[in-house]
Amino acid sequence: MAPNVEADYWAYIEDSPIENENRTLSDQVVDRYARSKFDHEDKQFLPAGCIDELVTVEAIIKELAEKDHLIPEDLDLSKEPKKSVVNFINERAKTVFAVAVLSYLRGEHLGRAMYQFMVKEFDDTSLPVKEEDLVNLVGTKNPWSKTRIHNFCREQWRFLAPIFSQQNFKIVLEPDHILPFIKKSSSVKEGAFSQVYEVEIHPAHQVDPIRNVRSFQSLLKCIRSTALIYLFSLG
């Protein structure tokens, strides 16, 4: 009986692990995700500061070239439009780039997408973006599709968790914002128009944390039917 080549092919599992230097940027981003403990549904976010560590010039070129290993020639930025696109990403659009990668864009498609963003001056300050606005900006032709646009607008929120300051505890949020709260008390105080929780903020999302306190706790007051939250330090 002849072997089932197709079955053998699909059943094959590679035993050797992927080396760290060969891991894609998307895998490295996912590994850094932290879990928000505020909402009932499972939500994850990328802590502030991680984007600069992960999206380096080398990482940018790897994704654009769709390569696991770079040779010296790959790092040559003397030619256009490669030079302008890489500089644009590195200086103004690291978050946009990471979101695009998480939206299954890589290689030539990723390069086209980032070139479009550069020409349209769509950078990190342009986030968040609504689906209809992104469609109007880039269209739905190659490299974009409705699925990629939907994924981009969904994934962007993982990179936009707010950063809190003791000087500014009043934050205006969109419904899709993921709150960087790594702990939340089970006890809730309810009023006629609000709920009050005790929460712990991820250290990377505190601009000026209280001294000698690793992760200070705060009271979170959620005003019903609005997108306003207030944080009151307990320290």
Image (tube, rainbow, N blue to C red):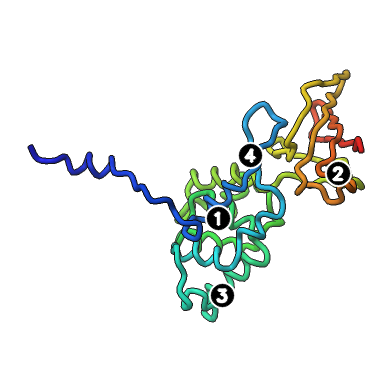
Q: In the picture, residue 34 is in which quadrant?
A: top right
* Residue type beneath disc 3: Lys
Can you tell which of label 3 and label 2 is closer to the viewer?
Answer: 2
According to the picture, the residue beneath numbered tag 2 turns out to be 213
Above or below, 138 against 81 in this view is above
Which residue is painted at 46% across and 59% down in the image? Answer: 22
- Asked whether 48 or 230 is in front, the reply is 48
Query: Alpha-carbon distance for marks 3 and 4?
Result: 33 Å
According to the picture, the residue beneath numbered tag 4 turns out to be 44
* Residue type beneath disc 4: Gln
* Label disc, if present, on residue 138 of the rendered structure: 1
According to the picture, the residue beneath numbered tag 3 turns out to be 83
* Residue type beneath disc 1: Val
Side of 11 where 200 appears, left or right: right
Question: Where residue 126 appears, x then y in whole percent?
Answer: 69, 55
Question: Where residue 67 appears, x then y in whole percent?
Answer: 44, 64
Which residue is painted at 72% across and 44% down in the image? Answer: 161
Residue 157 visible in the snapshot:
no
